[in-house]
Image (cartoon, helix red, strand yellow):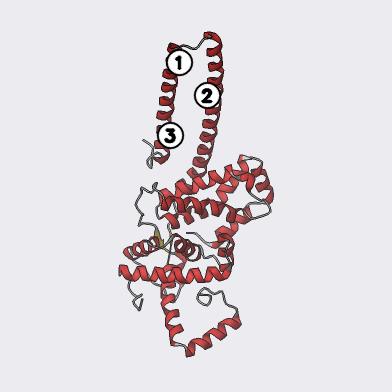
Amino acid sequence: MRYLDGEMTEAERTGFEKHLEDCDQCRRALEEMRALRCLTGSVAMKDPTDRFWEDYWKSVYRRIERKTAWIMIVIGAVMLLVYEMSRFVRFFGEITVEKTAAVILGVGFALLLVSVIRERAHQYKTDRYKDIQR
Amino acid sequence: MYSRMKMMDAEAGISKDVLIAWKKGNVRAFEMIVKNNMRMAYSIALGLVGNPDDAKDLSQEAFIAAHHARKSFDVKKPFFPWFYRILKNRCINFILGKRRRREISLDVLVEREDHGAAPDRLVMKQENREALWRALQSLSPEHREIITLREFHDMPYREIAAVLSISEGTVMSRLYYARRALLKALRRDGAVHGLEGDE
């Protein structure tokens, strides 16, 4: 491998070439690998367009910005919820079945809303056509 | 087309000051880091996952994850080997996980521009390039990774060892087994001629 990849010193190369003269097995193995290297060395990965690279950073930035926005929304929503719940308890005093049912109903709707928003966000993230202009 | 020089340029373009500023949360510094490393990150991800769209998504996700984990980065060390571990984990999880939806794209390899001067020039037909890409994608992630770094980025053993955090001896043996596996996959496919021989 080192011989083929040019990783040997001059002295090592000379020694190995001398060995090759007497060793059929090594010579065959080297030829095989050389043919493969010739094949892989003749190709390269296609470079995407300039537009692709222009959008690359913008997309990374957008995703970081959105993540930060989501974190702020969640923190704000939790703070508001805690505040409103404490106000609710203070205002209504005694806890009854109707009040409990109203709270459960409210929380259920809130969870449903969060679930729909999360699903939309996930769809957006995995949508391969999101960058295509309509 | 990517090369080792691009990686060296990328590393040279990021000073320690930029890394320190990024660690403190400076977005301009992060932009510089992304722009200096995005080509390398994308092409390594492409070698691992085989599809340009997935490679773009995963390499971008790796940059975002690196940004969120920047406090754990040691500015005395180079950025890329640290980032590479994040990128590789993302790609491996993706390959092994359920998120993989897209097919392997076959139109990824092109003939090397500087290959015309080589005396043993071998013009490859499109179907042969596709066969080579297919064979590469059939290898284990570990083999795919080392072939990508060596063959498509012309990285010397020393740099591969630094990026993968392994010894040069391990680079040599892993590369040998990866090439044997690639040879076997190409022979099995039978699309590329001139590689016939014993398995």
Residue lying farthest to the bottom in this orientation:
A22
Earlier in the chain: of badge 1 and badge 3, it is: 1
Q: Which residue is mark 1?
A: A100
Secondary structure under the numbered disc 3 in the rendered image: helix
In the displayed structure, would residue B128 be above or below residue B19?
Answer: below
Image disc number at residue B134? none
User: How many other residues sit within 10 Å of disc 3, few (<14), some (14-19) or many (≥20)?
Assistant: few
CA gap, disc 1 and disc 3:
31 Å
Q: Nearer the viewer, mark 1 or mark 3?
A: 1
Residue matched to label 2: A77
The C terminus of chain A lies in which quarter of the figure? top left
Would you say the residues marked 3 and 2 are in contact, meaning their CB atoms lie under 8 Å apart?
Answer: no
Give residue A121's mark. 3
Residue displayed at 43% across by 80% down: A29
Give the residue drawn at x 56%, y 82%. Answer: A13
Circle 2: is it few (<14), some (14-19), or many (20+) Cα within 10 Å? few
Q: CA distance from mark 2 to mark 1?
A: 21 Å
Tag 3, which chain?
A
Say which element carries label 1: helix
Residue placed most toward the observer, B198 or B44? B198
Residue B85: x and y, percent? 55, 54
Question: Is B185 left or right of B113, judged from the image as shown?
Answer: left
The three-letter code of the residue at mark 2 reads Ala
